[in-house]
Image (cartoon, coloured by chain):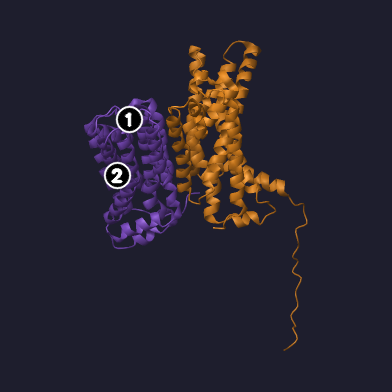
Protein backbone atom coordinates (compact mmCIF):
# COMPACT_ATOMS: atom_id res chain seq x y z
CA UNK A 1 0.00 0.00 0.00
CA UNK A 2 1.59 3.29 -1.09
CA UNK A 3 2.14 6.10 1.35
CA UNK A 4 -0.60 8.75 1.18
CA UNK A 5 0.80 11.75 -0.59
CA UNK A 6 -2.12 14.17 -0.52
CA UNK A 7 -2.01 17.31 1.50
CA UNK A 8 -4.82 19.21 3.10
CA UNK A 9 -4.71 22.72 1.76
CA UNK A 10 -5.59 25.62 3.95
CA UNK A 11 -8.29 27.28 1.90
CA UNK A 12 -8.89 29.99 4.43
CA UNK A 13 -11.92 28.52 6.16
CA UNK A 14 -12.66 30.55 9.27
CA UNK A 15 -14.76 29.76 12.25
CA UNK A 16 -17.35 32.21 13.41
CA UNK A 17 -15.84 34.13 16.28
CA UNK A 18 -18.41 36.84 16.77
CA UNK A 19 -20.91 36.99 19.60
CA UNK A 20 -23.34 34.08 19.76
CA UNK A 21 -26.93 34.82 20.64
CA UNK A 22 -28.12 32.36 23.23
CA UNK A 23 -31.32 30.76 24.29
CA UNK A 24 -33.10 34.02 24.97
CA UNK A 25 -32.57 35.27 21.43
CA UNK A 26 -33.82 31.99 19.96
CA UNK A 27 -36.86 32.16 22.18
CA UNK A 28 -37.50 35.80 21.27
CA UNK A 29 -37.17 35.06 17.57
CA UNK A 30 -39.61 32.14 17.80
CA UNK A 31 -42.07 34.26 19.75
CA UNK A 32 -41.90 37.19 17.38
CA UNK A 33 -42.17 34.94 14.35
CA UNK A 34 -45.17 33.22 15.92
CA UNK A 35 -46.87 36.51 16.61
CA UNK A 36 -46.29 37.68 13.04
CA UNK A 37 -47.56 34.35 11.71
CA UNK A 38 -50.75 34.74 13.72
CA UNK A 39 -51.69 37.85 11.78
CA UNK A 40 -50.13 36.70 8.51
CA UNK A 41 -47.50 39.45 8.56
CA UNK A 42 -44.59 38.74 6.27
CA UNK A 43 -46.64 36.19 4.37
CA UNK A 44 -48.77 36.19 1.25
CA UNK A 45 -52.10 37.96 1.00
CA UNK A 46 -53.91 34.64 1.16
CA UNK A 47 -52.55 34.01 4.65
CA UNK A 48 -53.88 37.38 5.79
CA UNK A 49 -57.50 36.85 4.72
CA UNK A 50 -58.83 34.90 7.68
CA UNK A 51 -56.99 36.56 10.60
CA UNK A 52 -57.79 40.03 9.35
CA UNK A 53 -61.39 39.06 8.63
CA UNK A 54 -61.80 38.33 12.34
CA UNK A 55 -59.88 41.45 13.37
CA UNK A 56 -62.05 43.51 11.04
CA UNK A 57 -65.30 42.13 12.45
CA UNK A 58 -64.34 42.69 16.11
CA UNK A 59 -63.11 46.20 15.39
CA UNK A 60 -66.31 46.95 13.52
CA UNK A 61 -68.40 45.73 16.46
CA UNK A 62 -66.35 47.86 18.86
CA UNK A 63 -66.71 50.90 16.62
CA UNK A 64 -70.46 50.37 16.37
CA UNK A 65 -70.78 50.03 20.15
CA UNK A 66 -68.75 53.20 20.62
CA UNK A 67 -70.83 55.10 18.09
CA UNK A 68 -74.09 54.03 19.72
CA UNK A 69 -72.76 55.04 23.12
CA UNK A 70 -71.58 58.46 22.04
CA UNK A 71 -74.75 59.23 20.09
CA UNK A 72 -77.48 57.80 22.32
CA UNK A 73 -75.59 57.63 25.59
CA UNK A 74 -76.57 54.00 26.15
CA UNK A 75 -73.83 51.52 27.07
CA UNK A 76 -74.33 48.62 24.65
CA UNK A 77 -71.68 46.44 26.24
CA UNK A 78 -69.05 46.92 28.90
CA UNK A 79 -65.39 46.19 28.27
CA UNK A 80 -65.59 42.83 30.01
CA UNK A 81 -68.76 41.85 28.15
CA UNK A 82 -67.00 42.46 24.87
CA UNK A 83 -64.91 39.30 25.20
CA UNK A 84 -67.99 37.23 26.08
CA UNK A 85 -69.91 38.47 23.07
CA UNK A 86 -67.03 37.72 20.71
CA UNK A 87 -66.55 34.12 21.82
CA UNK A 88 -67.48 32.53 18.47
CA UNK A 89 -65.01 34.73 16.66
CA UNK A 90 -62.33 33.90 19.23
CA UNK A 91 -62.92 30.19 18.58
CA UNK A 92 -62.63 30.79 14.85
CA UNK A 93 -59.45 32.82 15.31
CA UNK A 94 -57.88 30.03 17.36
CA UNK A 95 -58.91 27.51 14.69
CA UNK A 96 -57.19 29.67 12.06
CA UNK A 97 -54.00 30.53 13.92
CA UNK A 98 -53.12 27.52 16.10
CA UNK A 99 -52.70 25.10 13.15
CA UNK A 100 -50.57 27.71 11.37
CA UNK A 101 -48.27 27.92 14.38
CA UNK A 102 -47.63 24.25 15.09
CA UNK A 103 -49.20 21.96 12.47
CA UNK A 104 -47.15 23.29 9.55
CA UNK A 105 -43.90 22.54 11.36
CA UNK A 106 -45.11 19.02 12.11
CA UNK A 107 -46.18 18.39 8.53
CA UNK A 108 -43.05 19.68 6.84
CA UNK A 109 -40.80 17.89 9.32
CA UNK A 110 -38.64 20.88 10.28
CA UNK A 111 -38.70 20.23 14.02
CA UNK A 112 -35.27 18.49 14.00
CA UNK A 113 -33.87 21.73 12.56
CA UNK A 114 -35.32 23.73 15.43
CA UNK A 115 -34.11 21.33 18.06
CA UNK A 116 -30.59 21.19 16.65
CA UNK A 117 -30.20 24.79 17.84
CA UNK A 118 -29.34 25.66 21.44
CA UNK A 119 -33.02 25.47 22.24
CA UNK A 120 -34.39 23.43 25.13
CA UNK A 121 -37.30 21.21 24.23
CA UNK A 122 -39.74 23.19 26.31
CA UNK A 123 -38.93 26.55 24.74
CA UNK A 124 -40.51 25.80 21.38
CA UNK A 125 -44.06 25.07 22.61
CA UNK A 126 -43.88 27.79 25.26
CA UNK A 127 -42.86 30.41 22.69
CA UNK A 128 -45.67 29.31 20.37
CA UNK A 129 -48.14 29.36 23.24
CA UNK A 130 -47.11 32.85 24.30
CA UNK A 131 -47.39 34.03 20.71
CA UNK A 132 -50.92 32.64 20.36
CA UNK A 133 -51.99 34.04 23.74
CA UNK A 134 -50.58 37.46 22.86
CA UNK A 135 -52.35 37.41 19.52
CA UNK A 136 -55.65 36.54 21.20
CA UNK A 137 -55.14 39.21 23.83
CA UNK A 138 -54.44 41.80 21.13
CA UNK A 139 -57.54 40.62 19.27
CA UNK A 140 -59.73 41.20 22.32
CA UNK A 141 -57.83 44.12 23.84
CA UNK A 142 -57.43 46.24 20.70
CA UNK A 143 -61.18 46.78 20.17
CA UNK A 144 -61.57 47.54 23.88
CA UNK A 145 -58.99 50.27 23.42
CA UNK A 146 -61.06 51.63 20.53
CA UNK A 147 -64.11 51.65 22.79
CA UNK A 148 -62.08 53.34 25.54
CA UNK A 149 -60.81 56.09 23.26
CA UNK A 150 -64.29 56.68 21.93
CA UNK A 151 -65.90 56.75 25.36
CA UNK A 152 -63.22 58.65 27.27
CA UNK A 153 -62.86 61.62 24.97
CA UNK A 154 -66.49 62.12 23.99
CA UNK A 155 -67.85 61.88 27.52
CA UNK A 156 -67.16 65.54 28.29
CA UNK A 157 -66.25 64.90 31.93
CA UNK A 158 -62.63 65.94 31.50
CA UNK A 159 -59.88 64.02 33.25
CA UNK A 160 -62.28 62.56 35.82
CA UNK A 161 -64.23 60.81 33.05
CA UNK A 162 -61.07 59.50 31.44
CA UNK A 163 -59.90 58.10 34.78
CA UNK A 164 -63.24 56.38 35.42
CA UNK A 165 -63.19 54.83 31.99
CA UNK A 166 -59.64 53.64 32.58
CA UNK A 167 -60.71 51.93 35.80
CA UNK A 168 -63.38 50.12 33.78
CA UNK A 169 -60.96 49.24 30.98
CA UNK A 170 -58.22 47.61 33.08
CA UNK A 171 -60.36 44.74 34.46
CA UNK A 172 -61.65 44.24 30.92
CA UNK A 173 -58.09 43.84 29.65
CA UNK A 174 -57.27 41.41 32.47
CA UNK A 175 -60.36 39.42 31.62
CA UNK A 176 -59.28 39.36 27.97
CA UNK A 177 -55.98 37.95 29.22
CA UNK A 178 -57.83 35.11 30.93
CA UNK A 179 -59.70 34.36 27.70
CA UNK A 180 -56.41 34.38 25.82
CA UNK A 181 -54.66 32.05 28.27
CA UNK A 182 -57.43 29.44 28.37
CA UNK A 183 -58.22 29.42 24.65
CA UNK A 184 -54.59 29.49 23.56
CA UNK A 185 -53.54 26.56 25.74
CA UNK A 186 -56.49 24.36 24.78
CA UNK A 187 -56.30 25.27 21.09
CA UNK A 188 -52.56 24.81 20.77
CA UNK A 189 -52.71 21.43 22.51
CA UNK A 190 -55.31 20.18 20.03
CA UNK A 191 -53.41 21.60 17.07
CA UNK A 192 -50.12 20.00 18.16
CA UNK A 193 -51.67 16.54 17.86
CA UNK A 194 -51.91 16.54 14.07
CA UNK A 195 -49.84 17.84 11.20
CA UNK A 196 -52.84 18.41 8.96
CA UNK A 197 -54.05 21.97 9.32
CA UNK A 198 -57.52 20.99 8.13
CA UNK A 199 -57.92 18.35 10.80
CA UNK A 200 -56.43 20.59 13.47
CA UNK A 201 -58.90 23.38 12.69
CA UNK A 202 -61.83 20.96 12.72
CA UNK A 203 -60.66 19.43 15.98
CA UNK A 204 -60.33 22.78 17.73
CA UNK A 205 -63.80 23.86 16.70
CA UNK A 206 -65.20 20.48 17.70
CA UNK A 207 -63.65 20.70 21.17
CA UNK A 208 -64.93 24.21 21.83
CA UNK A 209 -68.38 23.81 20.28
CA UNK A 210 -69.12 20.32 21.54
CA UNK A 211 -68.68 21.32 25.14
CA UNK A 212 -71.14 24.22 25.12
CA UNK A 213 -74.35 22.13 24.75
CA UNK A 214 -73.10 19.86 27.55
CA UNK A 215 -73.33 22.90 29.82
CA UNK A 216 -76.88 23.45 28.59
CA UNK A 217 -77.88 19.91 29.49
CA UNK A 218 -76.08 19.81 32.83
CA UNK A 219 -77.68 23.07 33.93
CA UNK A 220 -81.20 21.58 33.71
CA UNK A 221 -80.36 18.45 35.69
CA UNK A 222 -82.44 17.95 38.85
CA UNK A 223 -79.66 18.88 41.25
CA UNK A 224 -78.69 22.38 42.21
CA UNK A 225 -75.06 21.48 42.82
CA UNK A 226 -74.72 20.04 39.32
CA UNK A 227 -76.48 23.09 37.90
CA UNK A 228 -74.07 25.46 39.61
CA UNK A 229 -71.04 23.40 38.58
CA UNK A 230 -72.29 22.86 35.00
CA UNK A 231 -70.26 25.75 33.61
CA UNK A 232 -67.05 23.81 34.26
CA UNK A 233 -67.82 21.65 31.24
CA UNK A 234 -66.92 24.18 28.55
CA UNK A 235 -63.89 26.48 28.29
CA UNK A 236 -65.92 29.53 27.29
CA UNK A 237 -68.48 29.21 30.10
CA UNK A 238 -65.66 28.41 32.52
CA UNK A 239 -63.97 31.69 31.67
CA UNK A 240 -67.31 33.49 31.84
CA UNK A 241 -67.98 32.10 35.30
CA UNK A 242 -64.57 33.12 36.61
CA UNK A 243 -65.26 36.58 35.21
CA UNK A 244 -68.67 36.69 36.86
CA UNK A 245 -67.11 35.75 40.18
CA UNK A 246 -64.11 38.05 39.99
CA UNK A 247 -65.54 41.04 38.16
CA UNK A 248 -69.14 40.93 39.30
CA UNK A 249 -71.17 43.84 37.98
CA UNK A 250 -68.69 44.73 35.25
CA UNK A 251 -69.92 41.67 33.40
CA UNK A 252 -73.55 42.71 33.48
CA UNK A 253 -76.32 41.32 35.66
CA UNK A 254 -75.05 38.71 38.07
CA UNK A 255 -77.92 36.31 37.40
CA UNK A 256 -76.71 35.51 33.87
CA UNK A 257 -74.29 32.87 35.21
CA UNK A 258 -75.79 31.25 38.32
CA UNK A 259 -72.70 29.67 39.87
CA UNK A 260 -73.80 30.00 43.48
CA UNK A 261 -70.93 30.00 45.90
CA UNK A 262 -68.59 28.04 43.66
CA UNK A 263 -66.62 31.04 42.37
CA UNK A 264 -63.26 29.96 43.83
CA UNK A 265 -63.80 26.45 42.41
CA UNK A 266 -64.09 27.98 38.96
CA UNK A 267 -60.95 30.05 39.42
CA UNK A 268 -59.00 26.96 40.52
CA UNK A 269 -60.47 24.97 37.62
CA UNK A 270 -59.37 27.61 35.12
CA UNK A 271 -55.82 27.61 36.50
CA UNK A 272 -55.76 23.79 36.49
CA UNK A 273 -57.05 23.68 32.92
CA UNK A 274 -54.32 26.00 31.66
CA UNK A 275 -51.63 24.22 33.71
CA UNK A 276 -52.82 20.82 32.55
CA UNK A 277 -52.85 21.84 28.89
CA UNK A 278 -49.36 23.35 29.16
CA UNK A 279 -48.07 20.20 30.88
CA UNK A 280 -49.57 17.99 28.14
CA UNK A 281 -48.12 20.29 25.50
CA UNK A 282 -44.63 20.04 27.02
CA UNK A 283 -45.09 16.27 27.25
CA UNK A 284 -46.08 16.21 23.59
CA UNK A 285 -42.93 18.05 22.51
CA UNK A 286 -40.63 16.04 24.75
CA UNK A 287 -40.73 13.19 22.29
CA UNK A 288 -42.27 14.50 19.10
CA UNK A 289 -41.71 12.46 15.98
CA UNK A 290 -39.71 14.05 13.21
CA UNK A 291 -42.53 13.38 10.78
CA UNK B 1 -68.40 -0.19 -5.80
CA UNK B 2 -66.01 1.76 -7.97
CA UNK B 3 -62.29 1.96 -7.33
CA UNK B 4 -62.48 5.68 -6.59
CA UNK B 5 -64.94 5.21 -3.76
CA UNK B 6 -62.84 2.33 -2.46
CA UNK B 7 -59.73 4.52 -2.40
CA UNK B 8 -61.68 7.31 -0.72
CA UNK B 9 -63.02 5.03 1.98
CA UNK B 10 -59.55 3.69 2.69
CA UNK B 11 -58.19 7.24 2.83
CA UNK B 12 -60.82 8.14 5.41
CA UNK B 13 -60.66 5.07 7.61
CA UNK B 14 -57.05 4.06 7.05
CA UNK B 15 -55.71 6.62 9.50
CA UNK B 16 -56.17 6.62 13.22
CA UNK B 17 -57.28 10.24 13.18
CA UNK B 18 -60.71 9.19 11.97
CA UNK B 19 -61.26 7.82 15.46
CA UNK B 20 -61.26 11.46 16.60
CA UNK B 21 -64.70 11.77 15.01
CA UNK B 22 -66.25 9.12 17.22
CA UNK B 23 -66.47 11.13 20.48
CA UNK B 24 -68.87 13.61 18.84
CA UNK B 25 -71.77 11.18 18.27
CA UNK B 26 -70.92 9.33 21.48
CA UNK B 27 -71.39 12.45 23.61
CA UNK B 28 -74.74 13.06 21.91
CA UNK B 29 -76.05 9.62 22.84
CA UNK B 30 -74.50 9.82 26.30
CA UNK B 31 -76.23 13.10 27.12
CA UNK B 32 -79.57 11.82 25.84
CA UNK B 33 -79.32 8.63 27.91
CA UNK B 34 -78.20 10.60 30.97
CA UNK B 35 -81.06 13.09 30.73
CA UNK B 36 -83.59 10.34 30.13
CA UNK B 37 -82.40 8.20 33.02
CA UNK B 38 -82.43 11.13 35.43
CA UNK B 39 -86.02 11.88 34.46
CA UNK B 40 -85.58 15.38 33.05
CA UNK B 41 -88.53 16.67 31.00
CA UNK B 42 -87.88 15.98 27.26
CA UNK B 43 -89.12 19.48 26.52
CA UNK B 44 -86.17 20.82 28.51
CA UNK B 45 -83.30 18.64 27.36
CA UNK B 46 -84.60 18.00 23.83
CA UNK B 47 -83.76 21.36 22.21
CA UNK B 48 -80.21 21.70 23.61
CA UNK B 49 -79.29 18.09 22.80
CA UNK B 50 -81.11 17.53 19.51
CA UNK B 51 -80.73 20.99 17.96
CA UNK B 52 -77.98 22.70 19.95
CA UNK B 53 -75.62 19.74 19.91
CA UNK B 54 -76.84 17.36 17.20
CA UNK B 55 -77.98 19.54 14.31
CA UNK B 56 -75.97 22.68 15.02
CA UNK B 57 -72.60 21.12 15.93
CA UNK B 58 -72.22 17.40 15.27
CA UNK B 59 -73.78 17.36 11.79
CA UNK B 60 -71.89 20.34 10.31
CA UNK B 61 -68.56 19.53 11.99
CA UNK B 62 -68.59 15.87 10.94
CA UNK B 63 -69.70 16.86 7.44
CA UNK B 64 -66.96 19.49 7.32
CA UNK B 65 -64.16 17.14 8.36
CA UNK B 66 -65.34 14.28 6.14
CA UNK B 67 -66.52 16.41 3.20
CA UNK B 68 -63.26 18.33 2.89
CA UNK B 69 -61.29 15.19 3.69
CA UNK B 70 -62.45 13.08 0.74
CA UNK B 71 -60.97 15.37 -1.90
CA UNK B 72 -59.19 18.16 -0.03
CA UNK B 73 -56.75 15.78 1.70
CA UNK B 74 -55.73 14.32 -1.66
CA UNK B 75 -55.26 17.79 -3.12
CA UNK B 76 -53.11 18.74 -0.12
CA UNK B 77 -50.99 15.63 -0.47
CA UNK B 78 -50.76 16.01 -4.24
CA UNK B 79 -51.96 12.43 -4.75
CA UNK B 80 -55.06 13.71 -6.57
CA UNK B 81 -52.86 13.72 -9.67
CA UNK B 82 -52.94 9.94 -9.74
CA UNK B 83 -56.71 9.96 -10.09
CA UNK B 84 -56.84 12.93 -12.46
CA UNK B 85 -54.46 11.28 -14.94
CA UNK B 86 -56.67 8.20 -15.28
CA UNK B 87 -59.04 8.23 -18.26
CA UNK B 88 -62.10 8.83 -16.13
CA UNK B 89 -64.83 11.37 -16.77
CA UNK B 90 -64.77 13.93 -13.98
CA UNK B 91 -68.24 13.04 -12.76
CA UNK B 92 -67.01 9.51 -12.10
CA UNK B 93 -64.52 11.02 -9.66
CA UNK B 94 -66.79 13.55 -7.96
CA UNK B 95 -69.91 11.42 -7.57
CA UNK B 96 -68.29 8.42 -5.81
CA UNK B 97 -66.43 10.77 -3.49
CA UNK B 98 -69.62 12.68 -2.72
CA UNK B 99 -71.44 9.39 -2.10
CA UNK B 100 -68.76 8.25 0.33
CA UNK B 101 -68.70 11.60 2.16
CA UNK B 102 -72.47 11.84 2.44
CA UNK B 103 -72.79 8.18 3.40
CA UNK B 104 -70.15 8.30 6.12
CA UNK B 105 -71.54 11.56 7.52
CA UNK B 106 -75.11 10.31 7.42
CA UNK B 107 -74.27 7.08 9.25
CA UNK B 108 -72.13 8.86 11.86
CA UNK B 109 -74.78 11.49 12.58
CA UNK B 110 -78.11 9.82 11.85
CA UNK B 111 -77.64 6.85 14.19
CA UNK B 112 -76.99 8.84 17.38
CA UNK B 113 -79.65 11.39 16.44
CA UNK B 114 -82.13 8.57 15.88
CA UNK B 115 -81.34 7.13 19.33
CA UNK B 116 -81.63 10.57 20.93
CA UNK B 117 -84.90 11.24 19.10
CA UNK B 118 -86.40 7.93 20.26
CA UNK B 119 -85.36 8.72 23.83
CA UNK B 120 -86.75 12.25 23.60
CA UNK B 121 -90.16 11.62 22.11
CA UNK B 122 -90.99 8.67 19.90
CA UNK B 123 -89.67 6.32 17.26
CA UNK B 124 -91.24 8.61 14.69
CA UNK B 125 -89.15 11.57 15.84
CA UNK B 126 -86.04 9.41 15.79
CA UNK B 127 -86.64 8.29 12.22
CA UNK B 128 -87.55 11.85 11.19
CA UNK B 129 -84.31 13.18 12.63
CA UNK B 130 -82.34 10.40 10.94
CA UNK B 131 -83.95 11.06 7.55
CA UNK B 132 -83.61 14.84 7.80
CA UNK B 133 -80.00 14.65 8.92
CA UNK B 134 -79.23 12.33 6.01
CA UNK B 135 -80.60 15.01 3.66
CA UNK B 136 -78.53 17.58 5.53
CA UNK B 137 -75.44 15.37 5.27
CA UNK B 138 -75.84 15.24 1.48
CA UNK B 139 -76.26 19.01 1.19
CA UNK B 140 -73.35 19.81 3.53
CA UNK B 141 -71.09 17.26 1.81
CA UNK B 142 -71.84 18.69 -1.64
CA UNK B 143 -71.11 22.20 -0.33
CA UNK B 144 -67.83 21.28 1.37
CA UNK B 145 -66.69 19.07 -1.51
CA UNK B 146 -67.17 21.99 -3.90
CA UNK B 147 -65.40 24.31 -1.45
CA UNK B 148 -62.33 22.07 -1.43
CA UNK B 149 -62.09 22.60 -5.20
CA UNK B 150 -62.79 26.34 -5.13
CA UNK B 151 -60.22 27.28 -2.51
CA UNK B 152 -57.06 25.94 -0.94
CA UNK B 153 -58.39 26.53 2.58
CA UNK B 154 -61.74 24.71 2.43
CA UNK B 155 -61.93 23.94 6.15
CA UNK B 156 -61.58 27.56 7.19
CA UNK B 157 -64.09 28.75 4.63
CA UNK B 158 -66.44 25.97 5.76
CA UNK B 159 -65.95 27.12 9.33
CA UNK B 160 -66.86 30.66 8.31
CA UNK B 161 -70.12 29.26 6.96
CA UNK B 162 -70.85 27.03 9.96
CA UNK B 163 -69.66 29.37 12.73
CA UNK B 164 -70.34 32.85 11.45
CA UNK B 165 -73.17 32.43 8.96
CA UNK B 166 -75.23 29.70 10.64
CA UNK B 167 -74.07 30.19 14.22
CA UNK B 168 -73.54 33.88 14.79
CA UNK B 169 -75.69 35.56 12.13
CA UNK B 170 -78.36 32.83 12.18
CA UNK B 171 -79.11 33.53 15.81
CA UNK B 172 -79.23 37.30 15.39
CA UNK B 173 -80.43 38.09 11.88
CA UNK B 174 -83.36 35.89 10.91
CA UNK B 175 -82.99 36.66 7.19
CA UNK B 176 -79.85 34.53 6.88
CA UNK B 177 -81.81 31.46 7.93
CA UNK B 178 -83.26 31.11 4.43
CA UNK B 179 -79.75 30.13 3.29
CA UNK B 180 -78.90 27.83 6.17
CA UNK B 181 -78.79 24.06 5.75
CA UNK B 182 -79.26 23.64 9.49
CA UNK B 183 -82.67 25.32 9.26
CA UNK B 184 -83.68 23.10 6.33
CA UNK B 185 -82.89 20.01 8.39
CA UNK B 186 -84.92 21.33 11.33
CA UNK B 187 -87.86 22.19 9.07
CA UNK B 188 -87.83 18.78 7.37
CA UNK B 189 -87.59 16.86 10.64
CA UNK B 190 -90.39 18.93 12.12
CA UNK B 191 -92.58 18.24 9.09
CA UNK B 192 -92.09 14.45 9.25
CA UNK B 193 -92.67 14.26 13.00
CA UNK B 194 -94.45 17.32 14.37
CA UNK B 195 -93.44 17.83 18.00
CA UNK B 196 -92.87 20.84 20.17
CA UNK B 197 -89.15 20.12 20.37
CA UNK B 198 -88.09 21.52 16.99
CA UNK B 199 -88.74 25.09 15.94
CA UNK B 200 -88.34 25.53 12.21
CA UNK B 201 -88.21 29.05 10.79
CA UNK B 202 -88.19 28.02 7.15
CA UNK B 203 -91.23 26.66 5.34
CA UNK B 204 -91.05 23.02 4.31
CA UNK B 205 -91.26 23.53 0.51
CA UNK B 206 -88.44 26.09 0.68
CA UNK B 207 -86.38 23.69 2.77
CA UNK B 208 -86.92 20.76 0.39
CA UNK B 209 -86.29 22.77 -2.77
CA UNK B 210 -83.24 24.55 -1.38
CA UNK B 211 -81.67 21.32 -0.05
CA UNK B 212 -82.07 19.70 -3.47
CA UNK B 213 -80.79 22.83 -5.19
CA UNK B 214 -77.70 23.06 -2.97
CA UNK B 215 -76.92 19.36 -3.35
CA UNK B 216 -77.24 19.33 -7.14
CA UNK B 217 -75.83 22.80 -7.72
CA UNK B 218 -72.63 22.34 -5.76
CA UNK B 219 -72.09 18.86 -7.22
CA UNK B 220 -72.33 20.26 -10.75
CA UNK B 221 -70.02 23.09 -9.71
CA UNK B 222 -67.51 20.61 -8.29
CA UNK B 223 -67.54 18.53 -11.50
CA UNK B 224 -67.05 21.68 -13.54
CA UNK B 225 -64.20 22.91 -11.33
CA UNK B 226 -62.46 19.54 -11.47
CA UNK B 227 -62.52 19.78 -15.28
CA UNK B 228 -60.13 22.69 -15.26
CA UNK B 229 -58.31 21.88 -12.07
CA UNK B 230 -54.73 23.07 -11.84
CA UNK B 231 -52.36 21.47 -9.38
CA UNK B 232 -50.44 24.04 -7.37
CA UNK B 233 -48.18 23.99 -4.36
CA UNK B 234 -49.17 24.65 -0.80
CA UNK B 235 -50.26 28.16 0.05
CA UNK B 236 -47.67 30.06 2.00
Q: Crowding near pointer 1: few (<14 within 10 Å), some, many (20+)?
A: many
Which is nearer the eye, B37 or A265?
B37
Circle 2 marks a residue in which chain? B
**Rendered colour, chain B:** purple
Q: Position of residue A198 (x, y in %)?
A: 45, 47
Which is nearer the eye, B72 or B8?
B8
Q: Which residue is mark 2?
A: B138
Number of dots carrying numbers: 2
Q: Which residue is mark 1?
A: B177
Q: Residue furthest top?
A: A157
Q: Is residue B35 above or below residue B76?
A: above
Q: Residue at x 40, y 42 (%)?
A: B61
Q: Residue at x 29, y 34 (%)?
A: B184
Q: Position of residue A5 (x, y in %)?
A: 75, 83
Q: Earlier in the sequence, mark 1 or mark 2?
A: 2
SS at mark 2 in the image: helix
The residues bearing labels 1 and 2 have C-alpha atoms spaced at a distance of 18 Å
Residue A134's disc is none
Q: Is residue B7 above or below residue A69?
A: below
Q: Quadrant of residue B203?
A: top left
Camera-side mark, 1 or 2: 2
Circle 1 marks a residue in which chain? B
Which is nearer the eye, A147 or A236?
A236
Q: Residue at x 34, y 37 (%)?
A: B116
Amino acid sequence: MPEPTGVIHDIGYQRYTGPRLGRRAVFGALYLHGLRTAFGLGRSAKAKIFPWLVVGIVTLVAAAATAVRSQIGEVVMTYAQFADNMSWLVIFFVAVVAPELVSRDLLSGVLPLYFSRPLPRSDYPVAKLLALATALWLLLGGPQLVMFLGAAFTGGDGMRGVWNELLDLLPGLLYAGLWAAVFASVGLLVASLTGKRAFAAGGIVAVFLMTTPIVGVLSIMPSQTINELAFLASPSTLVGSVGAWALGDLLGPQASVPIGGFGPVYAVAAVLLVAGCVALLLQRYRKVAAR
Amino acid sequence: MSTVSWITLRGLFGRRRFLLLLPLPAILVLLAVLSRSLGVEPGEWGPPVLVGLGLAVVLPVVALIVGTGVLGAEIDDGTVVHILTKPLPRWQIVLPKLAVAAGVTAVTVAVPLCVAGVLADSVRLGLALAAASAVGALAYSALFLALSLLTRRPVLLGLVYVLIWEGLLGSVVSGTRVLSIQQYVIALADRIAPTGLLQGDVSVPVAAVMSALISVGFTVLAIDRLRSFSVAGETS
